[in-house]
Image: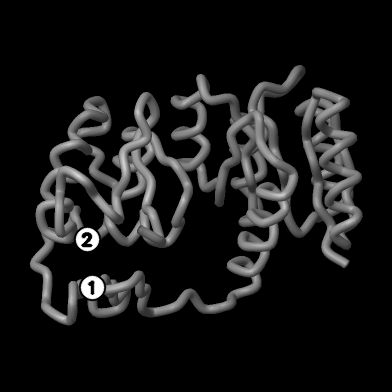
């Protein structure tokens, strides 16, 4: 049985998440502030940590930083939509995934399963296929209707990252951080030009995209089914 440490100060949320994940077959221990989270992490050596960022006594980012100094245990962050800067900082610290509040318990459980699978060393597929679009992660080649598509390194990294997480919405800043375009980290709108170029290369109708969809007011997501 995998042990999950849930660090969440909102007790009703903590209760619901704990009950749901226990029904999914996990052992779930709860801490209600950052200092308690640090103590329980040391006591339990959990297989995965679900970590709220806005914690009393010790901020979630500081707790993640302390944990990362001595462990690569998987971390899923719980964040509010307004906490974009903290979310990016958490990903840069080494968090494995994040879920934005409010969230569905079913989605959280799916992310827990996915992160644990990756942590257990199960190989990621070398090729992603979505209809006529093929993305070879090993050779870094993309084909559309079996014809090669010429992408820049940043365009490939961006497409691969989105396609690895179909349906998940990313902000512009998160995408810039994910593809490690550090020189433009202060200008998240830079991502729009990369998306525009990508659409012209992989979409049959760039103005009505099938794959890379704009989520107004937030950012972009990869749509697996058109």
Disc 1 and disc 2 in contact, CB within 8 angstroms: yes
Question: Is 38 or 179 nearer to us in this picture?
Answer: 179
> Quarter-wise, where is residue 6 in the image?
top right
Image coordinates of residue 181 in percent, x first then y, are: 23, 43
Q: Which residue is mark 1?
A: 140
Q: Which mark is residue 102?
A: none
Mark 1 lies on a secondary structure that is loop
Q: Nearer the viewer, residue 32 or 167?
A: 167
Q: Residue at x 90, y 53 (%)?
A: 22
Compute the Cα span from label 1 to label 2: 7 Å
Left or right: where does residue 62 sit relative to residue 178? right
Q: Is residue 33 left or right of residue 172?
A: right
- The C terminus lies in which quarter of the figure? bottom left
> Which residue is depicted at the point 58% across and 77% down?
122
Q: Position of residue 30 (x, y in %)?
A: 87, 39
Residue 189: image quadrant is top left
Q: Which mark is residue 156?
A: 2
Closer-to-camera residue (224/22): 224
Residue 79's x, y, as percent?
60, 30
> What residue do we see at 32% from left, 61% from top?
160
């Amino acid at each position: 049985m995998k042990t999950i440490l849930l660090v969440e100060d909102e007790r009703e949320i903590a209760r619901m998440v704990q009950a749901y994940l226990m029904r999914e077959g996990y052992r779930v221990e709860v801490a209600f502030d950052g200092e308690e989270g640090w103590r329980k992490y040391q006591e339990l050596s959990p297989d995965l940590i679900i970590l709220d960022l806005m914690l009393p006594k010790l901020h979630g980012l500081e707790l993640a930083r302390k944990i990362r100094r001595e462990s690569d245990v998987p971390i899923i962050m719980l964040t509010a939509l307004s906490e974009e800067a903290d979310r990016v900082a958490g990903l840069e610290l080494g968090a494995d995934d994040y879920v934005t509040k409010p969230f569905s318990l079913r989605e959280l459980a799916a992310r827990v399963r996915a992160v644990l699978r990756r942590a257990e060393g199960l190989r990621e597929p070398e090729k992603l296929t979505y209809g006529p679009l093929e993305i070879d992660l090993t050779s870094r080649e993309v084909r559309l209707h079996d014809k090669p598509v010429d992408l820049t390194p940043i365009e490939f990294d961006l497409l691969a990252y989105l396609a690895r997480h179909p349906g998940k919405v990313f902000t512009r800043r998160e995408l810039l951080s994910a593809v490690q375009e550090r020189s433009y980290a202060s200008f998240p709108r830079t991502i729009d030009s990369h998306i525009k170029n990508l659409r012209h290369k992989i979409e049959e109708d760039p103005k009505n995209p099938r794959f890379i969809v704009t989520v107004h007011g937030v950012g972009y997501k990869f749509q697996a089914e058109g």
